[in-house]
Image (cartoon, rainbow, N blue to C red):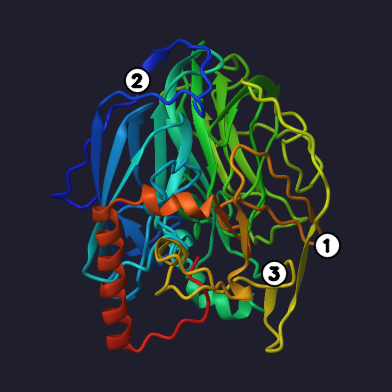
């Protein structure tokens, strides 16, 4: 899949021969400012794709899946111009910058119902934010299921690293994939998770057995030069898959987790849950053993259903061209484990002790219509996408409905602990931005002053455009869209 012609992308190239610059600065307390602004133009379109050789409808960014990577240096300002040209599906949209600290730029977070209305077809908007962190993450739509229809791409913010490496190979996406669209599967998924057809590494894979004349598609491959160390920026962009990642016979050095530099540690098999990011270094030191090695992204049966679990693979090769490897993968126990117990942040913080006076209870069950819903604190979040929470805060509207699932945190400079308890047997990650049914409003009285007049006008323009579009097409809201 090639990028659309005529769209200009301004960014910095990935450089090689990088030496670690130990991150001795706490970026949450000492923000960097380069004075540089980098601009990107993203156009969202409907298209037919075949990443594993089987065609299906999808959505793309600048004509490709994954979309283009956004590059910046730590301390840069980014202006990301987004145009909705989803003229076939007639979907609203938004772009969220996953894990980015929107300090004083909450209006640029790009989450429908929370910080903005959906962006209507034919409209454009510009998100402006500052790269206060460094490392690897991704952007994606935060409207409906579009992130798993193809509206996503990488973000690389150059900065210090906690270990040396020679070359940066950029973002490597791990995705599950189906030959039906995510939207088409959604009605059945409300009664139970479906079994997905396949998985992709950086937007590509085969479908069918090796050696079979009916096999379609092609594998991701990357050439290693013996003695060179490579940085890979892994992102699990799956909708319902916990992966274990490995490269046969090679050791993984982990140097960052979710935009946090960590004390480096080594492993052979890396757990990576949905939405998680790990920066890793692989040293090409196995050329004497073989020329071709399998790169594996293995769905864990304990919490993932996939028809092709043993064939989501890429090829690492040392020779002139990739060939089918004969290497054997590392042993592992199928599980939905996390790396949390191993991770130690490079820059530590002193955290005040917890006072356990309230627990949030997480459950999962069918509602009165027989449809599965997650419940947190006895409610499933539903917010009117025409009246986003940020606008309510700006308007000083404090009449929140219980189903908006809002928890207010008004005291500044205090640590807040949340313990989620559940007896529900399904493993489920939680991301402190929308979780599965919860909103946080921090220091509400200070928020309105951080939204400039021009930003408020931008948000109002999006909402007016969406209101007109929704009324014209008779669109009925059945969830929050997040």
> Does dot 1 land on a helix, a strand or a loop?
loop
Horizontal side of residue 223 vs 282, given as left or right:
left
Q: Please name the residue that numbered disc 1 is placed on.
A: 425
Instruction: Identify the mark nearer the N-term, 2 or 1.
Output: 2
What residue is shown at x 39% (from left), y 57% (from top)? 151
| Nearer to the camera, 11 or 36 | 36
Between marks 1 and 3 in the image, the one whose residue lies nearer the viewer:
3
Q: Check the image and name the residue furthest to the right.
A: 423
Asked if the residues shown at circle 2 and circle 1 are in contact, with their CB atoms under 8 angstroms apart, the answer is no
| Nearer to the camera, 460 or 310 | 460
Label of residue 374 in the image = 3
Spatial CA distance of label 2 from label 1 is 45 Å
Q: Is 373 above or below relative to 370? A: above
- Number of dots carrying numbers: 3
What residue is shown at x 69% (from left), y 61% (from top)? 305
Quarter assignment of residue 138:
top left
Q: Residues within 10 Å of mark 1 (few under 14, many from 20)?
A: few
Q: Please name the residue that numbered disc 2 is placed on.
A: 15
Spatial CA distance of label 1 from label 3 is 13 Å
Instruction: Identify the mark nearer the N-term, 3 or 2.
Output: 2
Q: Where does residue 110 sit, x and y in percent of width and height? A: 40, 56
| Nearer to the camera, 357 or 297 | 357
């Amino acid at each position: 899949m090639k990028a659309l012609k005529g769209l200009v992308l301004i960014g910095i190239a990935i450089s090689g021969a990088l030496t670690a610059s130990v991150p001795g600065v706490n970026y949450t307390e000492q923000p960097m400012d380069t004075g540089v602004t980098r601009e990107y133009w993203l156009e969202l379109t409907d298209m037919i794709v075949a990443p594993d050789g089987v065609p299906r409808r999808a959505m793309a960014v600048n004509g490709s899946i994954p979309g283009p990577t956004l590059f910046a240096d730590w301390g840069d300002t980014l202006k990301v111009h987004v145009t909705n040209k989803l003229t076939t599906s007639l979907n609203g949209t938004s772009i969220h910058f996953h894990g980015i600290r929107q300090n004083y730029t909450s209006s640029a977070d790009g989450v429908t119902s929370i910080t903005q209305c959906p962006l209507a077809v034919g409209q454009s908007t510009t998100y402006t934010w500052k790269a206060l962190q460094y490392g690897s993450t991704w952007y994606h739509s935060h409207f409906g299921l579009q992130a798993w229809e193809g509206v996503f791409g990488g973000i690389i913010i150059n900065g210090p690293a906690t270990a040396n490496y020679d070359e940066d190979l950029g973002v490597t996406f791990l995705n599950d994939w189906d030959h039906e669209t995510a939207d088409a599967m959604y009605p059945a998924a409300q009664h139970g998770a479906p079994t997905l057809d396949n998985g992709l590494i950086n937007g590509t894979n085969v479908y069918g057995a090796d050696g079979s004349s009916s096999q379609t598609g092609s594998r991701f491959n990357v050439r290693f030069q013996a003695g060179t160390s490579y940085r890979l920026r892994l992102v699990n962009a799956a909708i319902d898959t916990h992966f274990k990642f490995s490269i046969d016979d090679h050791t993984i050095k982990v140097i960052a987790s979710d935009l946090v530099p960590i004390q480096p540690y080594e492993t052979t098999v890396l757990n990576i849950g949905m939405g998680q990011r790990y920066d890793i270094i692989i040293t090409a030191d196995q050329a004497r053993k073989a020329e071709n090695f399998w790169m594996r992204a293995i769905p864990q049966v304990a919490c993932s259903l996939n028809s092709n679990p043993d064939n989501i693979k890429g090829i690492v090769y040392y020779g002139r061209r990739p060939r089918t490897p004969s290497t054997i993968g590392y042993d592992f126990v199928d599980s939905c484990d996390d790396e949390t117990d191993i991770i130690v942040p490079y820059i530590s913080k002193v955290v005040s002790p917890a006072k356990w006076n309230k627990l949030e209870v997480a459950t999962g069950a069918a509602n009165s219509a027989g449809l599965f819903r997650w419940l947190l604190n006895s409610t499933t979040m539903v917010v009117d996408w025409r009246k986003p929470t940020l606008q309510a805060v700006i308007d000083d509207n404090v009449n929140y409905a219980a189903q908006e699932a809002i928890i207010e945190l008004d005291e500044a400079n205090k640590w807040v602990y949340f313990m989620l308890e559940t007896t529900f047997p399904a493993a489920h990650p939680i991301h402190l931005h929308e979780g599965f049914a919860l909103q946080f409003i921090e220091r509400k009285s200070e928020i309105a002053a951080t939204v400039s007049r021009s930003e408020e006008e931008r948000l109002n323009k999006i909402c007016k455009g969406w209101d007109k579009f929704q009324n014209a097409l008779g669109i009925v809201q059945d969830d929050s869209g997040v």
